[in-house]
Amino acid sequence: MIIRARYVLPMDQPPIEDGAVVVEGDSIVAVGKTSEIRAAHTGEVRDLGERVLAPGLINAHCHLDYTRLRGEVGWHGSFTAWILQLVAAKQLHPEKEFIGAIPRGLDMLARSGTTTVVNIESFPGLLDQVLPTKLRVWWCLELIDLNRADEAKSVVTGAQEFIAAHAITRGGFGVSPHAPYTVSGELYRLSAQYAQTRNIPLTTHVAESEEEDDMIRRGTGQMYDYFLRAGRDMSDCKRAGPVQLLSEYGVLGPGCLAVHANSLTPLDIALLKQTGTHVVHCPKTHQFFHRSMPFLQTMMEQGINVCLGTDSLASNDSLNMLDEMQQMAQVYPRLSAQELLEMTTVNAAKALNQAGKLGRIARGAWADLIAAPLEGMGGDPYESIVFANKTVSFSMVGGEVLFDEAK
Ligand SMILES: [Zn+2]
């Protein structure tokens, strides 16, 4: 199949005007000017007209389960209270109620141009009922031991056994030790060893809130008081910051996606950079929590690989990566549309160790493609994707057309 569009955005070379892509099976076999492609290849041609063809977007942080909790958890100024509300809301619903949430969330992602998602999975038991998926999903199993290090081994063994018993056709598995306040050093160590041995991603929430920073770094504040009362072993508090703890546990590195990373010191930034850790920023969730982000620009300038995610509908009103890029454009007006699109394509592909397969339109990559109309006379093709109005008109994953409204 040959797909032709007014512009093709390969991402690793300049936009190709009047471009075409040859798809065979699940992969791209050629990309170039339509005239060159037509001269060298035969087959059905799908002409998308005055549209821009781009790699499918990658959402680097999502909780599809919580699509069920849309509008149920509000923000009242305390992160600790928000987390407790989330836990209570999860417990209100039987696990089977979350089954429908995953496909609903995936549908929202697909309509808005996401073709790959890094999903934190709290209910792996539901997977048998939702697999296989049309989108590419990295199912990162959520690991929590509430700092009971004696349980760490069984938590990791359980995840290993689950992963060994399942095959994913589009995407893969990863692990997600939840956050420094719910995960022991031992659980972090064991999950990092497992992820590194298997070469699968490890993703964790870290340095998300001031309350987490107060608890871990200073041994004070609302979160500290809550966990102390709940009987958590607090001996990991008051000696280092959350990012330093992850470094000590051997978690940071090129296989690690550190989510949020808001409360940082210069030392934390140096640790993230030295170790090649990827940072996932969730722009609209950030806004939901009224957070400041003094260091994102610094991290980008220092060459830390920054990707974007939606997080969940417990802290966002959409699962739409177009909205996230547009929010970034408002907060960081100096970022170009090309840089924003890189965050949701090539940067995220690199974080997943899939640079040759995802995030670009190139020979050998998977045929994960989206298209949106070229906006305006002489419109910028990158802006046409980044500022597309809520939805895209064409989506393909692994050579399979999910929808094509460009007809
Ligand atoms: Zn999250």
Image: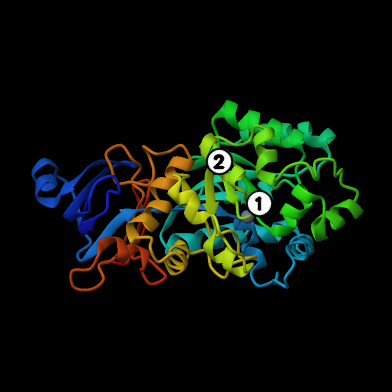
55 displayed left or right of 5? right
Q: Is residue 54 left or right of residue 307?
A: left
Ligand 1 closer than 8 Å to label 1 CB? no
- Farthest residue in the top direction? 197
The residue identified by callout 2 is 270
- Confirm whether residue 84 shows in the render: yes
Residue type pointed to by label 2 = Ala
Where residue 370 sits: x, y (%)?
34, 57
User: What x and y, as percent, mark residue 230?
Assistant: 89, 53
Front residue of 37/296: it is: 296
Q: Residues within 10 Å of mark 1 (few under 14, many from 20)?
A: many
Question: How many circles with numbers are drawn on the protein?
Answer: 2
Give, as a three-letter code, the residue at label 1. Answer: Ala
Q: Observer-nearest residue: 49 or 226?
A: 226
Q: Residue at x 58, y 51 (%)?
A: 130
Quarter holding the C terminus is bottom left
Q: Earlier in the sequence, mark 1 or mark 2?
A: 1
The percent coordinates of residue 152 (x first, y second) are 78, 35
Image quadrant assignment for residue 357: top left
In percent of the image, x 72 and y 31: which residue is there?
Answer: 157
Q: Using the image as rendered, state which of residue 336 and residue 395 is in the foreground.
A: 336
**With 338 as the anchor, is 377 left or right in this view?**
left
Mark 1 and mark 2: span between their CA atoms? 15 Å
Question: Within 10 Å of the Cα at label 2, are there few (<14), some (14-19), or many (20+) other Cα atoms?
Answer: some
Task: Give the label on residue 207, or none.
Answer: 1
Above or below 391: residue 354? above
Left or right of residue 56, residue 21 in this image: left
Location of ligand 1 given as a quarter of the image: bottom right
Disc 2 residue: CB within 8 Å of ligand 1 = no
Q: Residue at x 39, y 43 (%)?
A: 358
The colour scheme used to paint the residues is rainbow
